Image: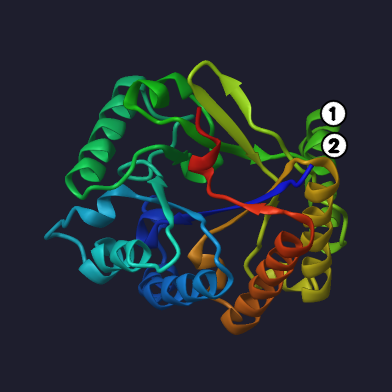
Amino acid sequence: MSGALCISIDVELAWGVWDRPDPESLTRAAEERSIVRALVAMFERHDVSATWAIVGRLLDRDPARRPELWFAPEVIDTIRAAKVPQDIGSHSYAHVYFTDTPREELRRDLAHARQVHDAHGLPFTSFVFPKNRVAHTDLLAEAGVRVFRSVDRGWHIDARERFGATAGRVANLVDKLLPITPRVVEPIRHGDLVELPSSMLLMARNGLRRAAHPAAVRAKARRGLEAAVETGKTFHLWFHPSNFYFDGERQLAILEDIVTEAASLRRRQGLEIRPMSAYAC
């Protein structure tokens, strides 16, 4: 048993807040270019292949929108040019919510996303649901997707499902503040489509989230990596570039510690570091 680390990243810029835009979010979205460059450089240093799930409209210019916030082909170019190959997946065409959108509209969104990927020579194997609202997975298979990320697994999720939303919020807070070992996961096959649950969100460091001490975050991730090695399962870490808007240098240092530990476990104990596409049927 060697286990694995999988990292998946939701690349949205302003599309992540299209339905609730606020001046700060819109202004800071332009920072994602430098954040992506820093992440790619880190992954090159440690020989890490990650999955970058992109909103298709980042490659589809709209004259009515400010290009630095809504149109970012150079971000995708940075990822494609990485010296360590990266997996570029889909985060839908327009960041639509699959739990709230009619099926035919979703089908059209996926078709547009596929057209953008095909036009730019990008794979369309991996998929991340906007806002993690998992629904209509059959439409993914119809569009050619082979693996999708589903929601976190863990005791805090179990608490919400068993005792309700309030208990779930309390459990989630406790889970984020303490270095409790995150749950490692296994791919789940649904015919030709594979579901890969997530294990842990690398949270932003603004507002109440700052209460999560960096040492606790590092310890939590380290325990997830060790659990993956011990069980032969996968520790699936995920985040957005926007999670680096606040206290970005500290956030990058935390992530670098995590991938440094993963690279060490790869050398010493055979941990694999693989993108979502590696789990496809």
Q: Which residue is mark 2?
A: 159
Q: Amino acid at mark 2?
A: Ala
Residue at (66%, 52%) from the top-left corner?
A: 272
- Which quadrant is home to the N terminus? top right
Q: Nearer the viewer, residue 51 or 215?
A: 51
98 lies above or below 128: above
Residue at (77%, 67%) from the top-left corner?
A: 217
**Image-quadrant location for residue 204:** bottom right
Q: Nearer the viewer, residue 155 or 256?
A: 256
26 lies above or below 159: below
Label 2 element class: helix
Point out residue 120 in the picture as x, y percentages from the top left corner.
20, 50
Point out residue 218 in the picture as x, y percentages from the top left corner.
78, 69
Q: Contact, CB < 8 Å: mark 2 with mark 1?
A: yes
- Mark 2 to mark 1 CA distance (whole Å): 5 Å
Q: Residue furthest left?
A: 63
Whether residue 258 can be seen here: yes
Label 1 element class: helix
Whether residue 206 can be seen here: no
Q: Residues within 10 Å of mark 2 (few under 14, many from 20)?
A: some
49 lies above or below 208: above
**Image-quadrant location for residue 154:** top right
Q: Residues within 10 Å of mark 1 (few under 14, many from 20)?
A: few
Q: Is residue 258 left or right of residue 196?
A: right
Point out residue 243 in the picture as x, y percentages from the top left corner.
56, 66
Residue at (23%, 47%) from the top-left corner?
A: 121
Q: Which residue is mark 1?
A: 162
Q: Residue furthest top?
A: 191
